[in-house]
Image (cartoon, rainbow, N blue to C red):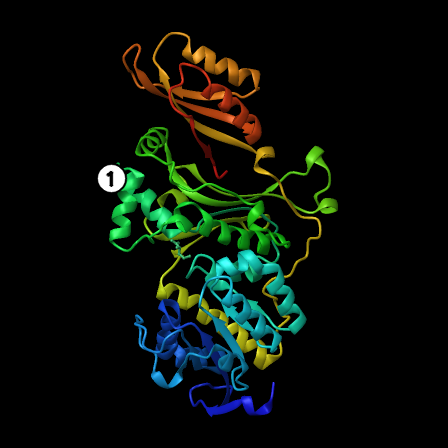
Amino acid sequence: MPAKSIVRALAPRHPDRPFMEQVNIGMLGGGTVGSGVYHHWRCNGALMAARLGLRLHLSRVAVKALDEPRPYEIPRAVLTTDWQAVVHDPQVRVVVELVGGTTVARTMVLEALRCGKPVVTANKALLSAHGEELFAAARRAGVNLYYEASVAGGIPIIKTLREAFVGNRITHLYGIVNGTCNYILTRMKQEGADFADVLAEAQRQGYAETPPDLDVDGHDACHKTGILASLAHGFWVRPEHIHVEGIRQVSKLDMQFAGQLGYTIKLLGIVKELPAPGGGSRRARGPRLQVSVYPALIPNTHVLASVQGVFNAVFVRGDVVGDTLFYGRGAGKDATASAVLSDLADAALDLVHGSARRVPAFVAHENHGTVVPLGEVSSRYYVRLSVVDRPGVIAKISAILGAARIGIASIIQPEGHVGEVVPLILMIHDAPNAVMDRALARIARLPVVKAPPVRFRVESLE
Ligand code: HSE
């Protein structure tokens, strides 16, 4: 880094460092999150300097339009519409990408890394789609790519996995990582309301995007779960290898039955280490993982069940630490800014102390890790069938399940009227997903079954 880019400034309050180094930062994107970062840096920059022994200085901000409305003001003097000028400014030593999307943002991040500048990003879609390429570019450049804000907003889960849990094998991770879905499911449960009604109201109130697909169809949770799986297990987990189901098929009826059975339905990002086939050595073949996103029944007694509204939570089980839980706001200008400021501090400390390799942001360290297709993974299930109430129906269904070696744990059928269509709820013991799919397809073809079967997996979180 050229000497002229290092600005020294007097910092009277730091006892060990009478002269503090200043690290200039160029920010790409000055919208909701960008203006939040600028605002909170202005409020707490001096506190950060006192803690870090260096000064962060947000010297330039590239935006699409100078006059666009933003939740917090950014002074006109630091704004530009020329992102290249920010990235190539020799005074700028760290680049923050907060524009979102996967096209221009990818070009921006690659260009900053090519210039040898550490990059901080909040962009989960970008990392999910191009993570391998971007981390390889960072490695070539000898700098870090930081991404705390990409998963679960203000919850410091990336730093926790990367640093605090470096001595653990992560055997299980369950994340409520999409606030929109958690808000909708919470209201469905609390109000006995149906998905479409809660979604429509959430959109009116600005809690859900229009269109809502990225959130309610599970894609946003997929991006985040893939990033967590990659970091926890040391090989890049591609989104196309993650089984994703959203929450559109959750109905108030299922919420009610789940509640009667002692469960809550949550959209979970799931990363589980599976045993080696035939009891072989895990070390020889690398980790075999289940990586999935789906709505699951979880016990009401588990702490994750009490995560309400837009809040996020990540439950991590390490082989050394045991069970841990991280809770907080997963989105929004303030919580996300908190994560970005943390990354900026790390990036600046790396530069000033020459410690970029201290705890690298992501290192691929497993050559043979695999994501096991969900069909081969065993789960427990809640199944709701719409059946004609007549003698012999349960016998027909249990014959199909029995032939597939699938065990029924319990059955509920609310009292109905003979000959009418009634719900039949089955709780099913562990069975491979592909076996369960085939059995449900056969059950669906029975003349007494009057609607497509509804199936959710049950996660006991034990
Ligand atoms: N749309 C996301 C959510 C926030 O609802 O949690 C951004 O990741």
Q: x, y (%) of residue 214?
A: 42, 51
Q: At 48% from the left edge and 79% from the top edge, which residue is drawn?
A: 25
Picture residue at 41% right of the left edge, 12% below the top: 393
Residue nearest the observer in this picture, 167 or 78: 78
Residue 106 location, x and y as percent?
54, 66
- Rendered image quadrant of residue 4: bottom right
Secondary element at tag 1: helix
Q: Report x, y in % for residue 201.
A: 25, 48
Q: On the image, numbered disc 1 is attached to which residue?
A: 191
Asked which quadrant contains residue 299, the reply is top left
Which is more toward the observer, 376 or 169? 376
For residue 420, say whether it is visible: yes
Residue 50 visible in the displayed image: no
Residue furthest toward the right?
284
> Dividing the image into four equal quarters, which quarter contains ligand 1?
bottom left
**Which residue is rendered at x = 37% and y = 47% of the image?**
181
